[in-house]
Image (cartoon, rainbow, N blue to C red):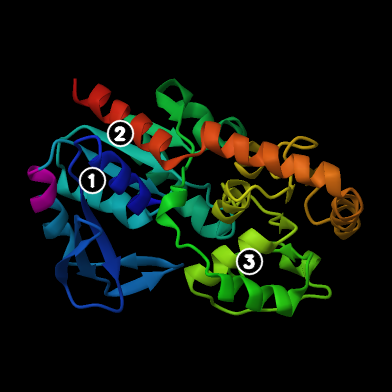
Amino acid sequence: MINQIVLGVADLGVASEVLSLSLSVVEKTIEVDGHVVHRCRSNFEVASTPFSASAFKQFRQLALGVDLIHYHFPFPFSDIVHFATQVKKPTLVSYHSDIVKQKWLSKLYKPLTHHFLSDIDHIVASSPNYLESSDTLSRFKHKASVIPFGLNKSSYPKATIKKLNAWREKFGPRFFLFVGVMRYYKGLHILVKNIHFTGFLPDEDKVALLELCYAVVFPSHLRSEAFGISLLEGAMYGKPLISCEIGTGTTYINIDKETGVVVPPNDPVALRQAMDYLWNNSKEALAMGVRAEARYRKLFTAERMAQSYAALYEKLLK
């Protein structure tokens, strides 16, 4: 999503530089899709959060030369860097998710979280659902707004006829599709019945499967699933959707009985009933897919997201 934001605002005259951490690379500056990315080597990780000694100096040098700093949350290391470097520039943070799994660490991190968010000029949530349901964000609504994540369909590759035919021959004319990694919050323990594991696939194969599938099923059952990019991809390709009500952006993308079916989380019976309903009502499923694509075009394009961020940048610089 950072790449989609940077690419989108570039078309509106905003130049961006990205600072990232990585365990696998030496420190260097590279160009990615026309913008500069500075990579700092991560020295160690704690609870999936990387830490880098060299990033403090690099961040301060970069921050002094820019007009505005755009953070992404949750990333405890950036909170520390923010206060350690004491760079006074306009700031905003894209709030991706509450901390859900690491509950004991969350209690330790909570004071820093509140201090960090209090110090930031503006907070952006990715859906009104998440802004309303997040306990953390509840105290910062006075300086928060919603900018949904957006996708640019033209940036996706085109599936060849050969590729489409190969997958059609393997899976038949109708199948449900899940796209994602096997993380604890994806709800795959509810879905795993009569399935094919394709493994990691190139984007062209993913596009082919999105074009061919009957519907997209997205059983994420915990709030760690703050938005659901692959659910949005299903909408972008005009597919009916199945998702769970977890109080996050998934139910902003998928509207029950309009763009698909929304079921209770962690409920295999309800999930099966939703799949049966779409399977046995092909006309309604097709209509839901049409409405899902229309909702994508109205609310979730990369162009709309970029315009919203560019307008916010300009507002914060006044």
Residue occupied by mark 2: 119
Q: Which mark is residue 278?
A: none
Where disc 3 sits, the SS reads helix
- Examine the structure image and report whether residue 36 is included in the region drawn in magenta: no
Relative image position of residue 30 (x, y in whole percent): 17, 66
Q: Is residue 293 visible?
A: yes
Residue occupied by mark 1: 83
Where disc 2 sits, the SS reads helix
Q: Nearer the viewer, residue 273 or 175?
A: 175
Label 2 amino acid?
Asp
Label 3 amino acid?
Leu
- Tell me how far mark 3 sits from mark 2, CA to CA: 44 Å
Where disc 1 sits, the SS reads helix
Identify the residue shown where x is 72% and y is 79%: 170
- Most common SS among magenta residues: helix
Q: Give the vertical position of 311 relative to 188 (above or below).
A: above
In the figure, is residue 124 to the left or right of 246?
A: left
Determine which quarter of the picture holds residue 164. Answer: bottom right
Q: Is residue 74 visible?
A: no
Outermost residue, front side? 161
Q: Nearer the viewer, residue 8 or 286?
A: 286
Relative image position of residue 124 (x, y in whole percent): 42, 34
Residue occupied by mark 3: 209
Label 1 amino acid?
Phe
In the figure, is residue 247 to the left or right of 158?
A: right
The magenta-colored residue range is 61-65
Bin the neighbour count of mark 2 within 10 Å (Cα to Cα): few under 14, some 14-19, many 20 and up.
few
